[in-house]
Image (cartoon, rainbow, N blue to C red):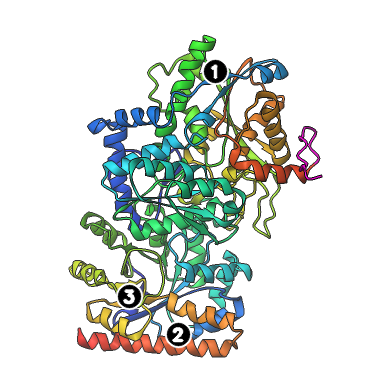
Amino acid sequence: MSNPAIDAAFTDGPAFIPYLAAGDPDYDASLEYVEALARGGADVIELGLPFSEPIAEGSTIQGAIVRSLQSGMTVDRYFEFVTELDVDVPLVCMTYYNLIYQYGNEPGPEPFVEQAAATGIDGFVVPDLPAEEADPLREACDEHGLDLVFIVAPTTDDDRLDRLVSLSSGYLYVQARLGVTGAREDVSTQTTASLDRLAEYDIPKSVGFGIKAGEHARDIVAGGADGIIVGSALVDIIADGYESDAPVEETAAELESLCKELTAGALEGAQQH
Amino acid sequence: MSETDTTFGDYGGQYVPEALMPAIEELTDAYERYVLGNEDGFMDEFRERIREFGGRPIPLQRADNLSERYDRDIYLKREDLLHGGAHKLNNALGQGLLAKYMGKERIIAETGAGQHGTATAMAAAHLDMPCEIYMGRRDVNRQRPNVFRMRLNGAELNPVDIGRGTLKEAISETMRDWATTVENTHYVIGSIVGPAPFPAMVRDFHRIISEETRRQAREQYGRLPDSVVACAGGGSNTMGIFADFVTDSPFSTAEDSNTAADADVSLFAVEAGGSSLDVDEKRGVAPNSASLSTGSEGVLHGARTKLLQDTDGQIMESHSVSSGLDYAGVGPELAKLVDDDRVTPVNVDDDAALEAFHRLSQEEGIIPALETAHALAFLETDAELGEFVVVNVSGRGDKDLQAALEETEQRDLPNAPSMGVFDE
């Protein structure tokens, strides 16, 4: 089963899925920034809950996580943030397993998932949770009607792919290239190969890792993706605004503008596909 | 997936990004075939190389002056005499050789005190493989001699500027490199931490410490020791010397294990108590590295284990005067053995470790690593150690001279030597 709000995001053209770390660079500005993503055309928002040891992130998102944690982000504040957020878009919580595991009185994912569901979260992406360790979280998500999105890597072989597809709900996160998150000039040819391999599976495929401009979005959707995930290119805008002390509205406008470019690129790609 | 169990009771597992899982599966297969199965004579070659390149077997030496001081027989397992000056070469050479058997073209490693980085750089040069080391900036500054040694052996050294710049950040950064280069690169993890099969595999390369100690104890003393004492950061020297004493462990391969004598051997893991066992939850700082003594269960760097973390699960910044113990986690197998009451976790603070550093230097003519000094400091306590005690001297202290002298100057230690400069 899967979450209807996330399913709906893929029914009407390609889904644009931006990522930001909640609380980057601080709580109030971050609310504005996440709302700007929705105005820019987000179909799903991946909202990062910062973890102190983000082993899958490149330097850009590590920077976002440090800014957020230093300005006081905690798990409870994250749930407040989600409650306060004024967007009409499904939210996927992207975080690392230890935060999910520790929440509540008993170790294990269930209390966190229950609270997330009550707060308005629709799904999870957990970069350090491979299929091998995912059963408890998968069960908790099923119990509360949330999606659990798995990442498919260029190194994932066919056996693992079958298993990931069977565990995944909502969409598959197709990692465009090996490495950590971060905006890149090129979009790897591995992406097209991955999408070809996934074509037979009946689940939306969203491609992430390195997309930073409308033309990337266009090419990837033209190559068969159902959605595009963009994080570092957006976080770069926040980092620049933070460094130069730019007004929040200015940074929010830049975010909205890049989101529109990416959305338009994805739409163009869908027409070519 | 392989048949090897990935867990130690509730601990262990494989919490890593999907991109790394195929490499973990490949490594598990290689571990089973080459290390456990000695396929193609892998373990024979490893043992020959660790003997000829490393200098094993390593003596078990009676420390006459300490024995008099404590009125017990104190024996030192002199891993400081292994090539490179620490036990680390057992694992670095083993994994380097395994990488070669697996057809990998490059090896990477993290390092805290620089001992594992140095051992990996030496092994890489010996095996003719390119090597890159990640080391926290703070550790680069406090362990200069090892930085130069790594470079002299031809390794590329990458300082890590994230966070506090210690072992935790170095491990995270090495995992990021591996996530990028996994197809041709092997990550030589330096302790019994990380995703399965690393904790078991690293222990198996260090098990030779335990094998030798048991044989030497019987030859030299006529029986097994009453207590074995080792410092514990991640825990590789600890599990290395404990491995074959853990008779109730299904992992023991000692031919003469499962004897009643083994169960009577007390095992003490000495952690860094730092400056205090209290934690500052608000600042996310634990001024110690005592995860076995004070930590709670959680997931870090690929494994479920005991961690220093806040109530949310954010990892605390640890502290120790010793870089090699300065880590917020610990090997999952040690966490399990502590829960089972087979291993007793204890800790000593920075001051006691520095005193022990000077004591061994002055009384036995051996300058120990600051990590090892923690194990030696534990001899001062009134714990029931029995009459025959083995301490694992996990490394020598040459790398620590600058740090030890600076730390000594900041304190009023009863046995601080005169280190004034002769410039008048």
Tell me whether circle 3 and circle 2 mark residues in contact (CB < 8 Å): no
* Viewer-proximal residue among A13 and B231: B231
Query: Which mark is first along the chain, 2 or 3?
Result: 3
Task: Name the amino acid, label 3.
Answer: Asp
Image vertical order of residue B67 relative to residue B180, above or below: above
Q: Residue at x 48, y 16 (%)?
A: B216
The chain ID associated with circle 1 is: B
Residue B29 at x, y = what percent? 27, 41
Q: Is residue B327 visible?
A: no
**Can you say whether A44 is above or below B375 in the image?**
below
Q: Residue at x 49, y 21 (%)?
A: B213
Q: Helix or strand or loop: what does disc 2 sit on?
A: helix
What segment is highlighted magenta in the picture?
B412-424
The image quadrant of residue A183 is bottom left
- Residue lying at the far top in this picture: please name it: B222
- The amino acid type found where label 2 is placed reads Ala
What distance separates the C-alpha of mark 1 from that of mark 3? 61 Å
Name the residue nearer the viewer: B116 or A267: B116
Is disc 1 in the same subunit as disc 2?
no
Q: Residue B105: within the magenta?
A: no
The N terminus of chain B, quarter of image: top left
Circle 2 Cα neighbour tier, 10 Å, few/some/many (<14 / 14–19 / ≥20): many
Q: Is residue B413 above or below residue B279?
A: above
Which residue matches tag 3? A7
